[in-house]
Amino acid sequence: MPKSVIISCAITGSLHTPSMSPYLPLTPEEIAKESIAAASAGAAIIHLHARDPQTGRPSADRKLFEAFLPRIKENTNAVLNLTTGGAPGMTMDERLAAPEWASPEMTSLNMGSMNIGLFAAADRIKDYRYDWEKPFLDGTKAGVFLNTFADITEILERLGKGHGCRFEFECYDVGHLYNLAWFADQKLYEPPLFIQFCVGILGGIGPELDHMLHMVRTAQRLFGDGAEWSVLAAGKYQMPLATHNVLLGGNARVGLEDNLYLERGQLARSNADQVSKLKRIFTELGYNAATPDEARARLRLKGASQTGF
């Protein structure tokens, strides 16, 4: 029997803006409700960002995380995975404020600096709900999402050694896998690794199946059996590449952070709808969804009882 599939669900993110979908959760209440529903639908890991509830702008305010993390924990057994990427323009202390307070089981960790071309979506939006949205998107034409070797080391030290956090290593190109291999070779992080192949973001590797397969094979050469891998495919590529990755023996991530649609021309009304669709597809192909505790065992997490919230 194939091993069970770890479904991650990224609830809101920091890249989509409120004008892109009325279903994007913005308030702590909405984020908590969406997270609980996604976990009930079969997501073992819930990946979390926060937003200003008044404007929907991405925020690193610890108080916002304080408003939804305990509620999600009380109502689910899911692994709660906090962002360390924050949003473009945030300082490292801003990015780590909530994770250092929460001391979660897992956080994300981007494995290299990159261009993120959100500006390509700006002209497709005809009516903006908030004044900040278009300048935010346009600003990415001249911006770089910084994740230097020093930044990565700092996150590994402050959260890994400091709090016993494990990481979702987000790799947006093949070079990011080699960055991760360097850190592993230096014994700065011990396996098992949980690698997220991030494909289809302008500025990173493209969403073609050949590229994803190259990422899989490269990770297998570099890490052997010491890695679990998953795929985050942006937009319309989400379900096709998630399904392919499951067939290759991997895991998959869905959620409104990565894709606002359920199918062509139909906005997803919730994160749970995407989780349910993916789970139905791979269940019909003979796979089972991993429970949160199965994910904890495979990824060697410290357990929900050891978090700070």
Image (spheres, rainbow, N blue to C red):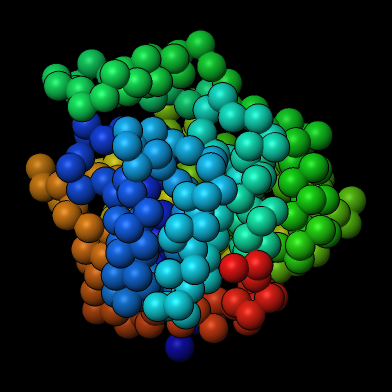
Q: Is residue 240 left or right of residue 164?
A: left
Q: Is residue 126 visible?
A: yes
- Give the total number of marks visible in the rendering: 0
Q: Quadrant of the C terminus?
A: bottom right
Name the residue: 51% across, 34% down.
87
Q: Quadrant of residue 34?
A: bottom left
Nearer to me, 29 or 39: 29
State the image coordinates of residue 163 (x, y, percent, origin top left): 76, 62
Q: Is residue 213 visible?
A: no
State the image coordinates of residue 200 (x, y, percent, origin top left): 40, 37
Name the residue: 70% across, 37% down.
93
Q: Residue furthest right?
A: 186
Q: Residue furthest left?
A: 265
State the image coordinates of residue 195 (x, y, percent, origin top left): 60, 56
Q: Residue furthest top?
A: 142
Image vertical order of residue 131 relative to residue 263, above or below: above
Nearer to me, 66 or 282: 66
Q: Quadrant of the N terminus?
A: bottom left
Q: Residue furthest bottom?
A: 1
Q: Is residue 181 left or right of residue 31?
A: right
Image vertical order of residue 163 relative to residue 184, above or below: below
Q: Quadrant of residue 282?
A: bottom left
Name the residue: 26% across, 24% down.
130
State the image coordinates of residue 234 (x, y, percent, origin top left): 36, 42
